[in-house]
Structure formats: C-alpha cells, structure tokens
C-alpha cells in the first residue's frame, strides 16, 4: 500500500481521538451547567455560554491557519490532531519545520516516505507532551517562589515574570533570525522571516492601540489571528522580492 499523508485511515484515527476530547468537553460542560443551576446562577448560563463560544472563534482561526500551513507537507490529519489536542501553533509549526529541515526537505514539500513522516510526528508530539509532565511537579513550586519574591519586592517580581516571558519568546526569535547571516553571502532569503515577523508585529501593535484608545475589547481577542493572516499574506510578496 502506498503511503499517503491524507489516507482515510489517518482521518478515522484522528477523528476518533478528537471525538473523545469533544465528548469530555460536552461532559464537563453539562456538569458545569448543572452545578451553576444548583448555585442559583441559572439566569447567567445562556449568556456565559454564548459569550464563551463567540470568543473561541479567534483562537480557532489561528489554529485553522496552522493546519492549512502544515497540510501541504504533512497532510490534514496530523496537523489537525496536533493543533487540536494539547497543541500549540507556535510550537508545532516550528517543530515540524525543524524536522522537515533535518530530513533535507523544504516546507511545502509533501512527505511521501513514512520513515520521515513518523519521526516528524514524534517530534511534534513528544516536545509538547513535556509540559504535561513538568506542570504537576514544577508549576506550584515556581508560582510560590515568584509569589514570595513579589511579596518581598514587587518590582523584582514583575522583572522575573517578564524575564520568563521574554525567555520563551527568544526561543522563537532565534528561529526567525537564524538565516539572516545569508545576506553577507548574497542570499536575501534569510530576511523573509524577519519581514514577515515585523509585519505581524505591526498589525498586532495597531490592533492593540485601537483596542486601547477606542476601548474595543473584542479586537484584543482577534488580534492574534489578524496578525497571523497578515504575516502569512505578506510572505508572498516578500518571497517574490527577496527570493525563496
């Protein structure tokens, strides 16, 4: 049987897994509604459910963009699974890109060899699964430590929190700037990720400014997918201009 990244069997397996996750969501939603009624909050249930459903559209759009971006190389099932169950668009796309590069394949090239597809699936899965192991053992101690620092010195508490966030961001910035040095060899393609990131950042800043000054709360929830779409769209002219 010829390997196919979009084989129907993969859709069946992924669909079964996601169905279990959806079933869990429905179960806990039913339990939450029942408990809310017991607490006398029945009048607020409908409004809360509708409001929550509306504001899940924004992250869902971001996930859909990630699935579309990865589907050319990995098909639909694997990105659909990884970005639906304990997935992260910022991690999965970078992990898949690095795994493809290690296999001497460029993004957008369809994987036809299962010996390459399986390691990519493992890279995308094992890395993100580390959080499941670390969170129960590390998070409580880390939070209590930061809380103690904040109680002693609020300024240092804020510095530590910001440093942790910037440390996380710097890991992805390295991926963006890693090929900039190619410019000195006459290859400007290394500037494409930088220009795409700059475009996304500008769109995000504009959304944040408008949301703050005009007090448009919903715009903050849609700023991420809007910046992602703008960045992906800008990649086309930047690639044409700087070379792919």
Image (tube, grey):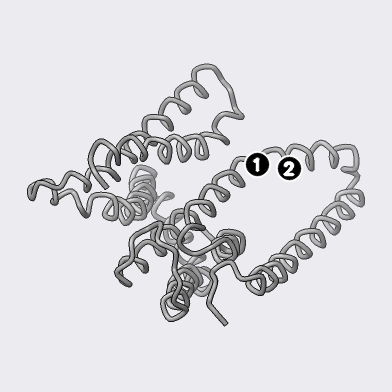
SS at circle 1: helix
User: Residue 183, percent across and down?
Assistant: 12, 46
Against 202, is 61 above or below?
below
State the residue in front, 80 or 57. Answer: 80
User: Residue 175, percent across and down?
Assistant: 29, 55
Q: Residue furthest top?
A: 214
- Horizontal arrangement in the rendering, residue 76 relative to residue 241 (left or right): right
State the residue in front, 40 or 145. Answer: 40
State the residue in front, 164 or 92. Answer: 92
Against 35, is 58 above or below?
above
User: Residue 143, percent across and down?
Assistant: 48, 59
Q: Quadrant of residue 108?
A: bottom left
- Horizontal arrangement in the rendering, residue 95 relative to residue 222 (left or right): left
**Callout 2 environment at 10 Å: few (<14), some (14 to 19), or many (20+)?**
few
Q: Quadrant of residue 191?
A: top left
Figure label count: 2
Against 56, is 20 above or below?
below
**Callout 1 environment at 10 Å: few (<14), some (14 to 19), or many (20+)?**
some
State the residue in front, 185 or 223. Answer: 185
Residue at the disc numbered 2: 53
Label disc, if present, on residue 24 of the rendered structure: none
User: Residue 110, percent across and down?
Assistant: 44, 64
Residue drawn at (33%, 66%) of the image:
105
Q: Quadrant of residue 50?
A: top right
- From the image, which quarter does the N terminus lie in? bottom right
Residue drawn at (87%, 54%) of the image:
35
SS at circle 2: helix
Distance from the alpha carbon under mark 2 to that under mark 1: 7 Å
Q: Residue furthest left?
A: 184
Residue at the disc numbered 1: 57
Tell me if label 2 and label 1 are in contact, CB under 8 Å: yes
């Amino acid at each position: 049987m010829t390997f196919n990244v979009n084989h129907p069997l993969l859709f069946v397996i992924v669909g079964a897994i996601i169905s279990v996750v959806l079933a869990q969501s429905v179960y806990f939603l039913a339990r939450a509604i029942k408990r809310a009624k017991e607490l006398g909050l029945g009048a607020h249930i409908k409004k809360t459910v509708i409001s929550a459903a509306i504001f899940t559209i924004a992250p869902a759009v971001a996930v859909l963009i990630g699935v579309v971006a990865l589907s050319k190389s990995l098909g639909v099932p694997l990105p659909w699974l990884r970005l639906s169950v304990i997935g992260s668009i910022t991690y999965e796309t970078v992990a898949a890109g690095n795994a493809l590069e290690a296999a001497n394949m460029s993004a957008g090239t369809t994987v036809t060899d299962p010996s390459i597809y399986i390691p990519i699936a493992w890279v995308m899965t094992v890395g993100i699964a580390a959080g499941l192991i670390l969170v129960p053992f590390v998070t409580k101690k880390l939070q209590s430590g930061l809380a103690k620092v904040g109680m002693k010195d609020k300024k240092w508490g804020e510095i530590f929190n910001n440093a942790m966030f910037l440390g996380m961001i710097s890991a992805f910035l390295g991926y963006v700037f890693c090929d900039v040095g190619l410019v000195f060899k006459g290859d400007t393609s290394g500037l494409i990720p930088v220009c795409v990131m700059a475009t996304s950042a500008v769109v995000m800043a504009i959304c944040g400014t408008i949301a703050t000054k005009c007090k448009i709360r919903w715009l903050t929830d849609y700023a991420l997918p809007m910046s992602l779409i703008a960045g992906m769209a800008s990649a086309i002219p930047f690639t044409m201009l700087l070379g792919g």
